[in-house]
Image: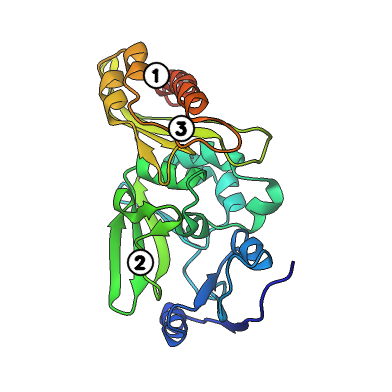
Amino acid sequence: MKPAPFAYAKARTLDDAIRLMGEHKGEAKLLAGGQSLIATLNMRLSSPSLLVDINGVAGLDDVSVRNGTVEIGALKRHATLERSSDIAKHAPLIALAMPHIAHPAIRNRGTIGGSLAYADPAAELPACLVALDGELDIAGPGGKRSVKAGDFFKGLFETALGPHDVLSAVRFPAATTETRVGFAELSRRLGDYAMVGLAAAANASGKGLSDVRLVYFGVGATPVRARKAEAALAAGSVDEAVKALDFEPTGDLHATSEVKKHLAGVLLRRVAKQLTEPRA
């Protein structure tokens, strides 16, 4: 199939993009990497009257590490983050997740902001940002604001973004020598969306872990924190953490809810081993 007719405009600034979105009263879509948008256009799941290309907006593809915080511009490509030594050092969870995102051709064009704004429940980056207790910077007609990752994902493909808003950057604490992270997912084929995935972060606390955050993806409409399992893992028992998984995954064509629940436990055991390994 081919997309329905639409107009095209190239924004030069954030304000320009916000103005263009406002002029079309919710009928416009932002174009960044386009790796999700183009598919929905071709299948006519999305029929905007205008595409607003933000690739020419300066400053949206920067990466900085300042005062213990990593900030990544929304236009930063997956492939660039995957190859970045700064990301490997200061954001190891993002580095672990990147090779699992689709295929190299997709990662060459796809952007971190696009993935987060699309909010696919089986995508890796939304879960990673929640695990890192990150924030998202949003620019809109009313000015700029920041939203915690845990509050950003509202439902299936639904976020805190308004119809005229632009996601400009993401921000989260930089890793320290005490930071421990883990990541694993199970998919039917390499590059497919995960049937079940788990992004995790914690702090080393003596011989144990503290501030454990276990965030599953592919099991519900949004990233799902396993809070009871977090507490059990912090107390030192992987077996009890697996028993404490108290969510009921959403079944789909690839796996039933019961199968996904079993796989969630398998991934927790794998990721728990990663969390106990000292940082290189």
- Relative to 86, say whether 4 is above or below: below
At label 3, the amino acid type is: Leu
Q: Which residue is mark 1?
A: 276
Residue placed furthest toward the bottom: 23
The picture quadrant where one finds residue 31 is bottom right
Q: Residue at x 48, y 25 (%)?
A: 258
Within 10 Å of the Cα at label 1, are there few (<14), some (14-19), or many (20+) other Cα atoms?
some
Whichever of labels 2 and 1 marks the residue nearer the N terminus, that label is 2
**Count of marks, rendered view:** 3
Q: Which residue is mark 3?
A: 198
Please state the horizontal and vertical placement of residue 254, each as a whole percent of the image: 60, 34
Q: Which residue is mark 2?
A: 138
- Considering the image in quadrants, where does the N terminus appear? bottom right
Name the secondary structure under disc 1: loop
Label 3 – label 1 distance at C-alpha = 16 Å
At label 1, the amino acid type is: Thr
The picture quadrant where one finds residue 7 is bottom right
- Relative to 227, say whether 163 is above or below: below
For discs 3 and 2, the disc positioned in front in the rendered view: 3
Please state the horizontal and vertical placement of residue 84, each as a whole percent of the image: 55, 47
Q: Is residue 177 visible?
A: no
Q: Is residue 26 left or right of residue 97?
A: left
